[in-house]
Image: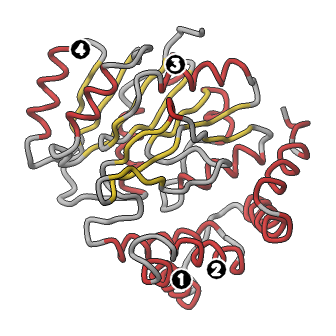
Amino acid sequence: MDRSGYVLISPCRNEADYMRRTLDSVAAQTVTPALWLIVDDGSTDATPDILREYADKHDWITVVTKPDRGHRAVGPGVIDAFYFGVEQIDLAAYAYSCKFDLDLEIPPRYFEILISRMEDDPRLGTCSGKPYIMRNGALVSERRGDEMSVGMTKFYRRECFDDIGGYVREVMWDAIDCHKARQKGWIARSWDEPDLRFEHLRPMGSSQSGIYTGRRRHGFGQYFMGSDPLFFLATSIFRMAEPPYILGGLAAIQGYLGAWLRRDRQLDDPELIRFIRAYQRRALRKGKAVAIAEQEAAQASHR
């Protein structure tokens, strides 16, 4: 196994309710990070005290404080905090990096397995396990596609991260990066296996202003990314089968339509938008698995 090391970078704000489970699960990894840089983005709860406690116990944990913006931020705000952390270190010194949230509980071999998969496949640029949430006393899958690494634990090979130019500072950054990686000839993947399933302690798509705000934000993000309208409609209908039933999908559609009617700005990368839409239209005709396999085969020469 490549032990040149991996670095975790964790933006956080007011995570006291969840973070001990996250901190303990990383400390229990069979391959611990060379560095875990935690960016405290203006916490006002017990987060700073808990971070000091763990940093005192583990010399590979470093905490930096970002000036308080006065509110919790998602999308571009999280990526701004991530890059504030990147500016404190030499990212090129690590073989792998991971944008890692502080509201997760991961299994002990999580990073060992991801590194092993990277070493086995030189085209694998970004990967992750699968998120589950606790619902009515049972863990339930968040149903994320195999063709994406998930945003809450976005594990990257250094060369791939450099090749795509890192993350865009906008909602849907965690999908745009995977599409960009495939455009460049890399593979993005996530696996639903017992040793790679983790608990997401805060539901994906929720928001500090409520879950409907989060779903409308997702709809705006799909518009910003340039998603094909029919593909987006199909995915919104798919999401209507999970809480909040029906209304969550409708809120996402509202966010997309609102952005379209306002003629909001979109991703400034026309070639990538064409690449994304071509995949989405193939996926509607042939299914996502076939469309991704065809796309990966077509882009193989880029590597």
Q: x and y percent of residue 168 in the render? A: 54, 52
Q: Disc 4 residue type? A: His
Q: Disc 3 residue type? A: Glu
Q: Circles 1 and 2: CB distance less than 8 Å?
A: yes
Q: Secondary structure at mark 3?
A: helix
Which image quarter is the N terminus in?
A: top right
Q: Circles 2 and 3: CB distance less than 8 Å?
A: no
Determine which quarter of the picture holds residue 37.
top left
Pointer 3 local density, CA inside 10 Å: few below 14, some 14–19, many at least 20: some
Residue beneath label 1, please? Answer: 253
Q: Disc 2 residue type? A: Leu
Q: Secondary structure at mark 4?
A: loop
Numbered mark located on residue 112 in the image: 3
**Image position of 292 (left or right of 17):** right
Residue beneath label 2, please? Answer: 233
In this rendered view, identify the residue nearer to me: 133 or 10.
133
Q: x and y percent of residue 112 in the render? A: 52, 19
Residue beneath label 4, please? Answer: 58
Q: Circles 1 and 4: CB distance less than 8 Å?
A: no
Residue shown at 59% from the left, 10% from the top? 2
In this rendered view, identify the residue nearer to me: 297 or 162.
297
N-terminal of the pair, mark 2 or mark 3, is 3
**Image position of 92 (left or right of 280):** left
In this rendered view, identify the residue nearer to me: 148 or 169.
148
* Distance in Å between CA atoms under marks 1 and 4: 45 Å
N-terminal of the pair, mark 1 or mark 2, is 2
Furthest residue to the front?
137
Pointer 1 local density, CA inside 10 Å: few below 14, some 14–19, many at least 20: many
N-terminal of the pair, mark 3 or mark 1, is 3
